[in-house]
Image (cartoon, coloured by chain):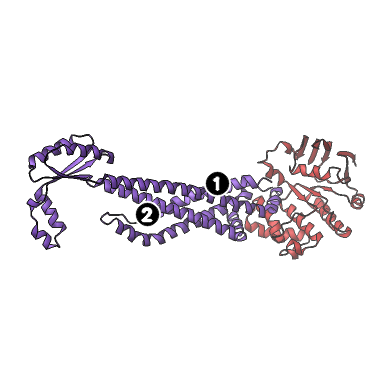
């Protein structure tokens, strides 16, 4: 479960998020939409505590992460698989190594890592790209690799911030379908922030629409 | 642990020139530290040795009777400044003379016990007490000559203390320099890895996971530079040793044992490690705040 309870965030006098309430049940797949500057990315960054709330609570399962200390934050971050618009892959590492970092952080042994990664890469359609570096991958492949890295953490929740923002329409659908498959097969809760109304309207999933820092639609 | 060492090794490769500068700086710092340490030990040893020799020697006129000399010895032993007094009779002086010059028959043939003076060798508690004892002896009858090396000892003590202070200042400056070099090397490593660090932190990496490689890098640099400085020091010792022995002939200067070297390396490594880890710690606190 992922829940935002009365979240307010200000930058100086600008109110970016104004008393936002939002709840995603276990295994739910929802979209977070809204125009640029509506506060979508800020809301998602609060989950990773890249920024802190001014007031309100954020629950991951039953834990209020706004109260988690900086020292204990890594444990919380390992519960959430994050997918970014700009992929945030490490250019000096190949596909295998990019995914292995997440597994190392999780404390997996080298032998386990070697066993898991081929399956993980295969599950996102990158079985034959194990030795490729990010610059040798297309935009869609980079995003698949980022999803594989997020999956390596075995998260209960995947949060994707504009995962199709840099991709063409066909590739965007590939990524959305991949996330949808993960949601159905693994029961992972997924929240996708997107501008892509074509995807949102076609899938008929739950939508939270954010405008001027407030949720104005929850359908 | 192994991951930290592997990442540290790749950081060292990436910043090979900076790492080389850091190792060189630390090596020189600890080599100079070793040299000054050796100098301090040697000068302390020499001072101890010289102070353990007879500090004042009083030679008596032939007219002085043995009883009057022994009475004077008793008086001296009663003085609080005096620790020991040794009497050498004319006969004993002759035996010593024969021993020293046994290879020079011309000298020994022309000498006899009557020509050599009886003497008292006097040890005092402190070099500064020499004047008191000397003044006391000047008023006594039957004394031909009083010899002592107060000025030489004091000059030696002054010089060795001066050199120790200069060394201390120089070493302090070099230690600060080594510390700053480590800080810069670690800071550059952090900057180079900033993107990777940001990503790993977002994936849930702990501080230990992120900081480990930088501390491992500090460990490697301190280990290598400690080893190099001991090797450098040991390669200088064979050249310096004959010169030192020649300069202080007659003084039984001890040689460097394996245990001394092991202790030197161990002590250097501990100090070097502390310095490197402190530099890394400050760099991590200063630059790894994203």
Q: Earlier in the sequence, mark 2 or mark 1?
A: 2
| Disc 2, SS | helix
Residue A24 place in picture, x, y as percent: 82, 42
Q: Colour of chain B?
A: purple
Drawn side of residue A184 relative to residue B20, left or right: right
Residue A78 place in picture, x, y as percent: 70, 47
Drawn side of residue B160 relative to residue A103, left or right: left
Answer yes or no: is residue A64 visible.
no
Which residue is under mark 2?
B259
In front: label 2 or label 1: 1
| Disc 1, SS | helix
Read off the chain for label 1: B
Residue count near mark 2 (Cα–Cα under 10 Å), binned few <14, some 14–19, many ≥20: few
Query: Looking at the rendering, which quadrant does residue B31 occupy?
Result: bottom left
For residue B80, above or below residue B46: above
Residue A84 place in picture, x, y as percent: 78, 51
Which residue is under mark 1?
B278
Answer yes or no: is residue B233 visible.
yes
Drawn side of residue A43 relative to residue B9, left or right: right
Q: Colour of chain A?
A: red
Residue A140 place in picture, x, y as percent: 81, 59
Q: Nearer the viewer, residue B88 or A59?
A: B88
Read off the chain for label 2: B
For residue A131, above or below residue B32: below
Query: Looking at the rendering, which quadrant does residue A206 occupy?
Result: top right
Label 2 in the same subunit as label 1:
yes
Q: Nearer the viewer, residue A138 or B149?
A: B149
């Amino acid at each position: 479960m992922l829940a935002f309870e009365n979240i307010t965030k200000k930058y100086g006098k600008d109110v970016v998020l104004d008393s936002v309430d939002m709840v995603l049940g276990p295994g739910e797949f929802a979209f977070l939409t809204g125009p640029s500057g509506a506060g979508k990315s800020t809301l998602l960054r609060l989950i990773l505590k890249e920024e802190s709330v001014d007031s309100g609570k954020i629950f991951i399962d039953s834990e209020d992460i706004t109260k988690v200390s900086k020292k204990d934050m890594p444990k919380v971050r390992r519960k959430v698989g994050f997918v970014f618009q700009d992929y945030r892959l490490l250019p000096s590492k190949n596909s295998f190594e990019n995914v292995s970092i997440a597994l190392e952080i999780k404390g997996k042994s080298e032998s386990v890592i070697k066993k898991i990664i081929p399956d993980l890469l295969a599950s996102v359609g990158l079985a034959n790209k194990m030795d490729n570096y990010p610059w040798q991958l297309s935009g869609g492949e980079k995003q698949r690799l980022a999803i594989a890295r997020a999956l390596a953490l075995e998260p209960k929740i995947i949060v994707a911030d504009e995962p199709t923002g840099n991709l063409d329409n066909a590739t965007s659908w590939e990524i959305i379908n991949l996330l949808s498959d993960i949601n159905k097969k693994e029961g992972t809760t997924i929240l996708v922030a997107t501008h892509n109304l074509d995807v949102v309207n076609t899938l008929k999933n739950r939508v939270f629409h954010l405008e001027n820092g407030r949720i104005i639609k929850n359908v | 642990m192994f991951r930290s060492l592997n990442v540290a090794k790749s950081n060292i490769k990436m910043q090979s020139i900076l790492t080389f500068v850091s190792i060189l700086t630390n090596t020189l710092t600890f080599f100079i530290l070793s040299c000054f340490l050796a100098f301090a030990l040697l000068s302390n040893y020499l001072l101890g040795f010289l102070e353990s020799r007879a500090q004042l020697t009083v030679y008596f006129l032939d007219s002085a009777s043995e009883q009057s000399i022994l009475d004077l010895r008793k008086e001296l032993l009663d003085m609080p400044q005096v620790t020991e007094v040794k009497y050498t009779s004319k006969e004993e002086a002759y035996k010593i003379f024969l021993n020293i010059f046994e290879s020079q028959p011309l000298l020994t043939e022309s000498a006899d016990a009557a020509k050599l003076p009886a003497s008292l060798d006097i040890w005092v508690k402190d070099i500064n007490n020499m004047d008191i004892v000397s003044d006391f002896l000047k008023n006594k009858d039957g004394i031909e000559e009083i010899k002592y090396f107060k000025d030489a000892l004091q000059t030696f003590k002054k010089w060795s203390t001066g050199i120790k202070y200069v060394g201390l200042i120089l070493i302090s400056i070099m230690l600060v320099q080594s510390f700053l070099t480590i800080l810069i090397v670690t800071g550059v490593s952090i900057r180079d890895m900033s993107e990777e660090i940001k990503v790993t932190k977002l994936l849930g990496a702990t501080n230990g996971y992120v900081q480990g490689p930088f501390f491992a890098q500090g460990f490697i640099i301190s280990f290598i530079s400690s080893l190099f400085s001991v090797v450098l020091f040991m390669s200088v010792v064979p050249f310096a040793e004959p010169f030192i022995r020649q300069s202080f002939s007659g003084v039984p200067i001890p040689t460097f044992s394996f245990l001394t070297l092991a202790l030197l390396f161990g002590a250097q490594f501990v100090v070097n490690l502390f310095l490197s880890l402190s530099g890394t710690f400050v760099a991590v606190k200063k630059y790894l705040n994203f």
